Image (cartoon, grey):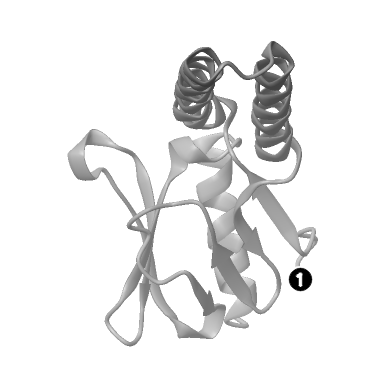
Amino acid sequence: MSGLPTPHVYRLAPTMAARLMGPALVLLALLVLGLTALVAAAGLPPDLLVLGIAVGLAAVLTLGWWMRARAWVLRVDEDGYAVRLVRGAGTRAARWTDVSQAATASPNGIPCFVLHLKDGTRTTLPVQALAVDREDFVREMQRRLAAGQKLKPLS
């Protein structure tokens, strides 16, 4: 496939991971608040509060590790692509042969890469969600699309 590594996984951008960690930390704070009220009102042992905080903190740290090391937004190979973790992406997976056009767009001022499919649907990827340079990503996706559709470059 013209020297492109395959399959390739595009990870979640650190800024997006940080944005997703915010609600997890708020949820942890609410858990601590509720658990503190329960321990105080019911006269339960304070060790229960410490245990709850430890479990909640471990869950938040695990979520952070997962988003940094395991979570991916886009997975591409020689056959097609799959998208995760993007609300409103449209079609989540398709073969390269089903793509009719690739374009860039900026809905609401957000730079996106859009794959229009032959069945009239599309996949919209906000490039800011990916841990990759926008221009490099667009060029690589164009090469993958051409290779997936068995197109030969013009000489």
Outermost residue on the front side: it is 43
Q: Position of residue 116 (x, y in %)?
A: 34, 71
- Seen from the viewer's position, the closer of residues 31 and 148 is 31
Q: Position of residue 80 (x, y in %)?
A: 60, 75
> Could you tell me which residue is drawn at 57 percent across and 81 percent down?
149
Q: Give the position of the N terminus as an image quadrant.
A: bottom right
> Could you tell me which residue is drawn at 36 percent across and 47 percent down?
112
- Give the image quarter of residue 62: top right
Q: Position of residue 19 (x, y in %)?
A: 46, 26
> Could you tell me which residue is drawn at 50 percent across and 49 percent down?
138
Q: In the rendered image of this protein, does residue 116 appear above or below residue 132? A: below
Q: Give the position of the C terminus as an image quadrant.
A: bottom right
Q: Which residue is mark 1?
A: 1
- Seen from the viewer's position, the closer of residues 2 and 56 is 56
Q: Position of residue 120 (x, y in %)?
A: 27, 82
> Could you tell me which residue is drawn at 78 percent across and 64 percent down?
6
- Seen from the viewer's position, the closer of residues 138 and 69 is 69
> Position of 115 compared to 95: left or right?
left
Outermost residue on the left side: it is 108
Q: Amino acid at mark 1?
A: Met
> Position of 93 compared to 58: left or right?
left
Secondary structure, mark 1, is loop
Q: In the rendered image of this protein, does residue 38 appear above or below residue 104? A: above
